[in-house]
Image (spheres, helix red, strand yellow):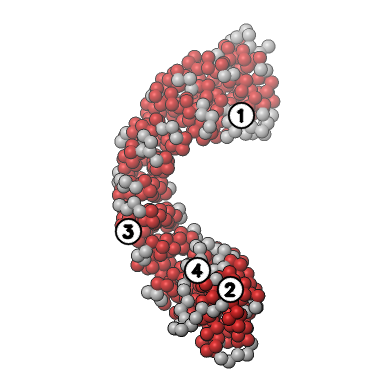
Amino acid sequence: MVPEELIKPTVSEGTSICHAESLCQHLECLKLCGVDCEDEKQMLQSLNVVLLEIDEDMQTSAKLLTDYDVLPALGKILKTRPNCAQKVAQVIAELAKNEETRKPCIEAGLVMALVPLLQSSDQELLLHAGRAIGHICYENNELQEQLVELDVITSLVKILTDYPDNDTLVRVGLLALSNLADLESAKEALSKTMVVEQLVKQLKRAENHERVEIIIEVLQMLAEHEPLKMQLVNASVQETLCDILQRLQNSSQAEDMCTMKSSSDLIVSLLLGDDSMQKLFDHGCGVVYQNIPLWLTSQHTLLQMTGALAIANFARNDANCVRMVELGVVHQLLDLLEQHVENGDVAVQHAALSALRNLAIPVMNKVRMLEEGVANRIQMLLRSEMPPVQFKLLGTLRMLTDGQADTARILGQDSNLLARLVQWCEAKDHVGVRGEANRLLASLLRHSKSQDVVKAIQKAKGVKHLVSMTTSEHAIMQNEALIALAIASAINLEAVEEAFKESELVSILHNVLQDESMGPEVKYNSMGLLCSLIDSDDLRKEMEVTNLKETLEKLCGHSSSNVIKQASKVLRIMEHSRHNSDHFFP
């Protein structure tokens, strides 16, 4: 938050604007006042002249005050002249707007002289002392930490509590909090006060855009602290935020859109904590969840995004997922996605797909979502050319097929889907899309265990991509590919044999087994695949050429017992095959 606009000083009628010479005389007077002058009337007159001169020419006046070494005298007047403290604080507040003057103010000890004034009951004194401290400490983390240690937080919260109707004073308190609330020490101190309750009250009564933005900015910083996040939810800030969104939803004015954005962001921040998220959900009865249908069907993409993100966050809990599917949220998301298929908002599609993916995690939700035709409706997004949407779509489809044989069988024979998957398996500009496309191909084989799916994927030229996937840098992807290929070769080796030869699968598997950095699970699954390949005469010949037997014999001394057992098993099968073939290992 930038320092506030200038609050013009008021001076008694008849006071004229002084020239530089006159200002110097008043500065000399103030310097003496800081030592032994008893004439408070003269002090106030000099302070008024200084205020006028600052208003006329900030740079020149600030330089003269520094050159005449008046700042330490102002500090002394603050401590010893209560009747002049308000005017001195006002002078300092105006001076400290000038960045070059802040350091001299600090060196003169003015912050320490001002802090005790925050305990005053004089609202004008509080106003100018708060402004002065805020300006001097602006963007100075070290000083801000000192203020927290001096318990300025308590004084600021007291201002909000004791003078909630003094808009000017409240604004100063809010600006001060916005400068401090980003500090962890400040958040900790604020969590022990009633600041949340006061801020929510101020948000409810705030009428202008600037006030709302300042309050939400402070609340957003507080929401990063878990105890304060729960305090915000307990204070029902979500109800006020939802009211703001409802009030502004038909507006297209820039400042209203800005307020809607900050309100939406704060709602999402509150959902990031597990406890606060659960309290907000309230079995689907919470005000945020109740507003989701309105947001998803709004003309504002911002509100659509808020609704989708809210569902995605509520869906971090399995019980919530089941409840939301029961309440029909899936088709609300699909309706939203259909609006954005052609030249739609990528961020909205991404958020909606994230929500669908999370909803599909519980097994009982998979069944219900598939029965309701989600897999078919979601394929409308196959037309998307946006990598973030493609990535989320693939992940959602993979989650829906996980453990669902019928779905994997249907999708695994869909020529349009397979053609798009193979195309994305070759995506050079987006590693994530390429990886997810390969993983979905593997998933269709693993979960369908269908001969028809094997043929369909081979016809779509997808097998070679699964072979390439066995060399992935991610072990989980290697294992998924190895298991999928083992299933395919066990079901219909004849259909995939040619693709295996063209992609040099045997050589790849041999390299995997020789690689000492490769994990035992990858080696185990590689040998499982080899067991399925031995029935092919051509692939057996390749094993002979690569001297695979020697590598397997070495693996019989591996540190993993599972690897040893699997290597022994492959050798036995190979030995058995040798007796039935004249051209295998000599």
Question: Which type of secondary structure does the marked residue at label 3 adopt?
Answer: helix
Find residue 523 and name its label. Answer: 1
Q: Residues under labels 3 and 4: Cα distance?
A: 26 Å
Q: Residue at x 66, y 14 (%)?
A: 545
| Tag 2: amino acid | Ser
Q: Which residue is label 3 attached to?
A: 243
User: Residue tagged by mark 4?
Assistant: 176
Q: As rendered, which of 192 and 526 lies closer to the eye? A: 192
First-in-chain label (3 vs 4): 4
Residue under circle 2? 61
Looking at the picture, does residue 133 appear above or below residue 461? Answer: below
Q: Earlier in the sequence, mark 1 or mark 4?
A: 4
Q: Would residue 403 be seen by someone viewing this image from the given angle?
A: no
Q: Of the residues shown, which amino acid type is indicated by label 1?
A: Lys
Q: Nearer the viewer, mark 1 or mark 2?
A: 2
Kindly identify the residue that appears in the image at 62 percent across and 20 percent down.
507
Nearest to N terminus: mark 4 or mark 2: 2
Q: CA distance from mark 2 to mark 3?
A: 48 Å
User: How far is the residue under mark 1 from the one under mark 3?
Assistant: 58 Å
- Give the percent coordinates (x, y) of residue 357: 41, 40
Q: Residues within 10 Å of mark 3 (few under 14, many from 20)?
A: some
Give the mark toward the camera: 2 or 3: 2
